[in-house]
Image (spheres, rainbow, N blue to C red):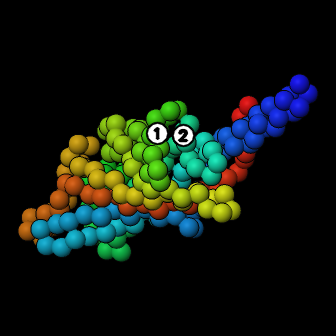
Amino acid sequence: MMRWFIVGVALLSTWCSAWAEVDYRLATDESSVSILGNSSIHAWESSVDSFAVTARFHAEDGALVGVDSLIFIADVLSISSGKKIMDSKTRDALNAEAYPQIRFHAGERTARVYGDTIAVSGQLSLAGVSNDIDVTGTYRILANGDLNVSGTVEIDMTEYGVKPPTAMMGMLKTSPQVQIAYSMLFVPVSLEVKP
């Protein structure tokens, strides 16, 4: 009887150690966000140079099994293409003065994890308009415990009341559809074993 009790305790300990709730901080220097779009003349790309992410994930046996929360905040004034006129038009289109941040917030139990893919449902807010969207990406838990998540999200800017910028007296027209490409490296900051 005592032997079975010890075996039971050992199995319970193994199960507990396999399930963990982990807070992560973003490794900013090793993460990136880009905006990719097209126009009637050429494709274009801008980088988002200032953004922050906080997240809490559930991991089990080296695999992601859930997300408790995820908040992404980007500074509109940090969007840069390397071209002053384009950057100015982007800021005007996004009404950066009134709405200086782009925010995505996903609450508890809004993620689906399958294989190496994670889909997070949340609310994206930009230019004063908020819509529910799904953000899908692939993830890897590295040997040191860091978490890498990357993917692309397609957004129709007109759904946020954003008029696609034009230039050259209307000869250059940008498409309302843009892709947000991201690569995020998260570093664990706390580990709490769940009973």
Task: State left or right for residue 8 relative to residue 85.
Answer: right
Q: Position of residue 144 (x, y in %)?
A: 68, 62
> Circle 2 is placed at which residue position?
66
Q: Which residue is most to the top?
A: 1
Confirm whether residue 45 shows in the render.
Answer: yes
> Circle 1 is placed at which residue position?
111
When asked about the image quadrant of residue 78, the answer is bottom left
Q: Give the mark nearest the N terminus, 1 or 2.
A: 2
Q: Position of residue 80 (x, y in %)?
A: 38, 67
Instruction: Identify residue type, mark 1.
Output: Ala
Q: Quadrant of the N terminus?
A: top right
- In the rendered image, the vertical position of residue 70 relative to residue 39, given as above or below: above
Contact between labelled residues 2 and 1, with CB atoms less than 8 Å apart: yes
**Residue placed at 26% from the left, 70% from the top?**
44
The answer to which of 5 and 19 lies nearer the viewer is: 5
Task: State left or right for residue 42 relative to residue 16.
Answer: left
**Residue placed at 30% from the left, 64% from the top?**
36
Give me the disc on residue 162.
none
Q: Residues within 10 Å of mark 2 (few under 14, many from 20)?
A: many
When asked about the image quadrant of residue 22, the answer is top right
**Residue placed at 67% from the left, 53% from the top?**
188
Confirm whether residue 101 shows in the render.
Answer: no
Which element carries disc 2, helix, strand or loop?
A: strand
- In the rendered image, the vertical position of residue 143 relative to residue 19, given as above or below: below
